[in-house]
Image (cartoon, helix red, strand yellow):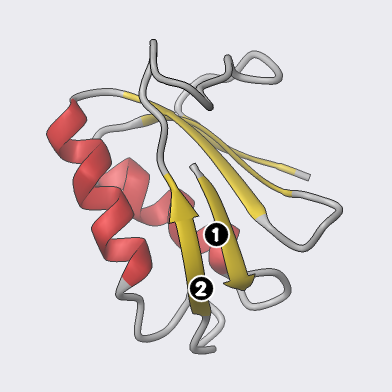
Amino acid sequence: MIISGKVQGVGFRATTRKIATELGLKGLVRNLRNGNVEVFCEGNKEKINELATRLRNLERTSLGVRPSVDSMNVAYEGEPGYSEAWKPYSGFNIDY
C-alpha cells in the first residue's frame, strides 16, 4: 500500500502497526521521502482489506491526531504495482 495525505508526523505508522497486529497481519510500515507512507503486509486478503478500510477511516492516531488520507494504492501479489518487502521482518514492524 502507498498512502498519501497528512500521514507523517501524526502517529500513522504506530497506528498502522497496532491495527495490523490486531488483525494478525505481518509486515512493515515506513515513511517515504516524498511524504507518503508505504505498508507491506502478509496475511489473509480480507484482513488486508480491513486494514486498508480502517486506515482510510481513521478518526485519530495513537498520538490523538486526525490524519488525512488523500489516496491509497493497494497492490496484491501478482498485480501491477506490487513489490516485495524491502527488508526482513517478524510480526509487524515500523521501519525507522
| The quarter of the displayed image where residue 49 is located | top left
Q: Quadrant of the C terminus?
A: top right
Disc 1 vs disc 2: Cβ atoms closer than 8 Å? no
Residue 95 has which mark? none
Please tell me which residue is depicted at 36% across the width and 24% down the height of the picture: 76
Please tell me which residue is depicted at 57% across the width and 19% down the height of the picture: 83
The tag earlier along the polypeptide, 1 or 2, is: 1
Answer above or below: position of 19 versus 63. Answer: above
Answer above or below: position of 87 versus 62. Answer: above
Q: Residues within 10 Å of mark 1 (few under 14, many from 20)?
A: some
Please tell me which residue is depicted at 49% across the width and 88% down the height of the picture: 66
- Mark 1 sits on what residue? 14
Q: Is residue 55 left or right of residue 8?
A: left
**Front position in the image: 29 or 73:** 73
Disc 1 on helix, strand or loop? helix
Answer above or below: position of 56 versus 72. Answer: below
Label 1 is placed on what type of residue?
A: Ala
Cα separation between marks 1 and 2: 19 Å
**Rendering coords of residue 13 (x, y %):** 58, 57
Residue 70 has which mark? 2
Q: Residue furthest right?
A: 33
Q: Residue furthest left?
A: 46
Q: Is residue 24 left or right of residue 27?
A: left
Please tell me which residue is depicted at 77% across the width and 63% down the height of the picture: 35
**Rendering coords of residue 55 (x, y %):** 37, 63
Answer above or below: position of 53 versus 70. Answer: above
Disc 2 on helix, strand or loop? strand
| The quarter of the displayed image where residue 34 is located | bottom right
